[in-house]
Image: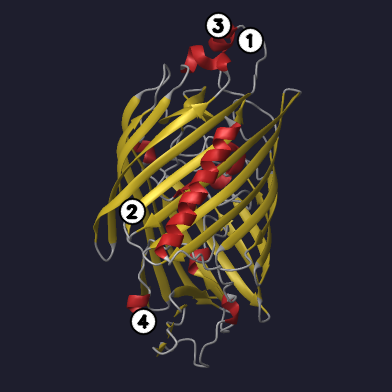
Amino acid sequence: MKYSLLCAALMLAAFIQTAFAQHEGHQMPQPKPAASPIETPSPQKPAEQTEMDMSSGHMDHGIFVMHDDQMFLRIGQKESNLVPMGRMGSGTSWQPDSSPMPMLHKQSGEWLLMFHYNFVAGVNRQGGPRGVTKFESANWFMSSAARRVGPGTLELRGMLSAEPFTFPPGGSPLLFQTGETYKGQPIIDRQHPHDLFMELSATYTVPVGERASWFVYAGYPGEPALGPNAFMHRASASENTSAPLSHHLQDSSHISFGVVTTGFQYRWFKLEGSVFNGREPGENRYNFEAHPWNSRSARLWIAPNSNWSIQVSHGFLRNPEAFEPGDVRRTTASISYNRKFERGNWASSLIWGRNHESHNGEIFNLNGYVAESTLKFLDRNYFYTRLELTDKNSLLRAADRISLGITDDHPSFRIGAFTFGGARDIWNTEKTSFAIGSDLTFYSKPSLLDSIYGSNPVSWKLFFRLRPNQMNLSAMH
């Protein structure tokens, strides 16, 4: 199956390369490194004065600037301190600067207001003896407001989800998924809903010299500096409605009730560290939780040009699971790539996460690997895939272990999940995009699990998706 995974990835790369070559005259142009946004030239005008230069494609709105079809947030007063809006991911994470921006925005006085949402609903059919069929909705709604305050810039962010009401009881059916609890029992073969309050945070950023800045981020809840962009924010997973099976090895800390992060950025480097509450959210998805802020993490970001973002991170999580005491040391690394082309976009990510867990004197090392990609072509068509291998040691309940003759309380299994899907925008307006889509997921697993999951389970989804349309910055010049 490992060879099948490799072949599938190579076939996908070949398909995408061929599509680009056919579209651009059978010649693949090399990506041109983008100039650092802090080096963007602009007229020497007062920051409050809106200024337009049609010949250079430059528009200055004070708190934000548009230049060469890219939108920047101004940090402080100087023209050299501009941050690409496409770079802003979940929490304090970075996406490639060229990433798509499906959002609404408005300037109100000195405030820049932005609104994002993603509403997906449809039929979820998980195959095999443990599979079920449910109608469900995955969704999130996010608003932010930014303005200059003193020498720096303040950003306020709020993010909500209705999944506690729109997911089936116990969570969204998802074969081989584990993590968190429902009615006092570990969740197995389901993805837990997000909390009603996913993020309530504030970030203050101050320029330090011409090309550097310092920031502090506080969230309750919020996301610490640990792992890649949360999966629902990644451009490479924009059309995939499911969480990766390795979610709890990579980016599960994105809802932490108590986070303080501070960091320093110099051009395309950023080093940041967090102190936070590492406990996973409880079964009550509507409340604010209070636990000690006794977990910590550090992360390094590198964004060498507008198409790439790379991170490595490590964190210590104190007793993240409420019903299984034990600490986790998590290490992650990821590479994300995004490239725009005429009438389309290609976003991809490679992600690795590792949990070193200690429970009741037992030591576990669990690894998760994800390769995902989304190709938008001919303006309104999407092809997407996610290929992953992950270790699971919480798949079996006591009755399952007895039936299989397993004496180990935490037997570990290497699980593969391979998703292929497509979507099409069928109704677009200036502000809204409505699409329909579907995908299939195939699995690999040890034959020992055949009696529980079946020999070859296959899952599928059929859904519709509603979100803001992609911002057309060239039309705003």
Mark 4 sits on what residue? 477
Q: CA distance from mark 4 to mark 3?
A: 67 Å
Q: Is residue 121 visible?
A: yes
Which quadrant would the C terminus be assigned to in this image? bottom left
Question: x, y (%) of residue 259?
Answer: 60, 51
Question: x, y (%) of residue 29?
Answer: 52, 68
Asked if labels 1 and 4 touch by Cβ distance under 8 angstroms, the answer is no
Asked if labels 3 and 4 touch by Cβ distance under 8 angstroms, the answer is no
Asked if labels 3 and 1 touch by Cβ distance under 8 angstroms, the answer is no
Q: Earlier in the sequence, mark 4 or mark 2?
A: 2
Q: Of discs 2 and 1, which sits in the foreground? A: 2
**Residue 403, numbered label:** 3
Q: Mark 1 packing: few (<14 Cα in 10 Å), some, or many (20+)?
A: few
Q: Earlier in the sequence, mark 4 or mark 1?
A: 1
Q: CA distance from mark 4 to mark 1?
A: 66 Å
Q: Mark 3 packing: few (<14 Cα in 10 Å), some, or many (20+)?
A: few
Question: x, y (%) of residue 334?
Answer: 62, 50
Q: Mark 4 packing: few (<14 Cα in 10 Å), some, or many (20+)?
A: some
Q: Amino acid at mark 3?
A: Ser
Q: Earlier in the sequence, mark 3 or mark 2?
A: 2
